[in-house]
Image (cartoon, rainbow, N blue to C red):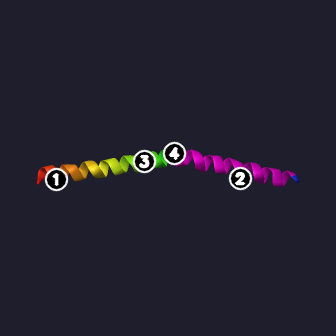
Amino acid sequence: MTAGEVAGLIAAGAFAVLVLLAAVPLLKLGRLLDEARFTLHDLGKDVE
């Protein structure tokens, strides 16, 4: 393996870790938005 190939593997591994770490906050944000949508729906029912 050449130094360039090793560097490419390291970069690919680092990118995979970055994607996994970014997925956690995005999933939490999705849950937060779902909860906000349910809350607004319930508030709309109470106003009527």
Residue 24: numbered disc: 4
Cα distance in 3D space between marks 2 and 4? 19 Å
Q: Of the residues shown, which amino acid type is indicated by label 3?
A: Leu
Magenta range: 3-23
Task: Determine whether, in the image, residue 21 is placed left or right of residue 46.
Answer: right
Q: Residue at x 26, y 48 (%)?
A: 39
Check if mark 3's residue and mark 4's residue have beta carbons within 8 Å: no
Q: Residue at x 44, y 45 (%)?
A: 28
Cα distance in 3D space between marks 2 and 3? 26 Å
Q: Determine the secondary structure under disc 1.
A: helix
Give the foreground label among 1 and 2.
1
Q: Of the residues shown, which amino acid type is indicated by label 4?
A: Val
Task: Determine whether, in the image, residue 6 is placed left or right of residue 19.
Answer: right
Q: Determine the secondary structure under disc 4.
A: helix
Q: Earlier in the sequence, mark 1 or mark 4?
A: 4
Cα distance in 3D space between marks 1 and 4? 32 Å
Give the foreground label among 2 and 4.
4
Q: Nearer the viewer, residue 32 or 8?
A: 32
Q: Which residue is mark 3?
A: 29
Q: Position of residue 24 (x, y in %)?
A: 51, 45
Q: Residues within 10 Å of mark 2 (few under 14, many from 20)?
A: few
Q: Position of residue 21 (x, y in %)?
A: 57, 44
Cα distance in 3D space between marks 1 and 2? 49 Å
Q: Nearer the viewer, residue 2 or 39?
A: 39
Cα distance in 3D space between marks 3 and 4? 9 Å
Q: Which residue is mark 1?
A: 45
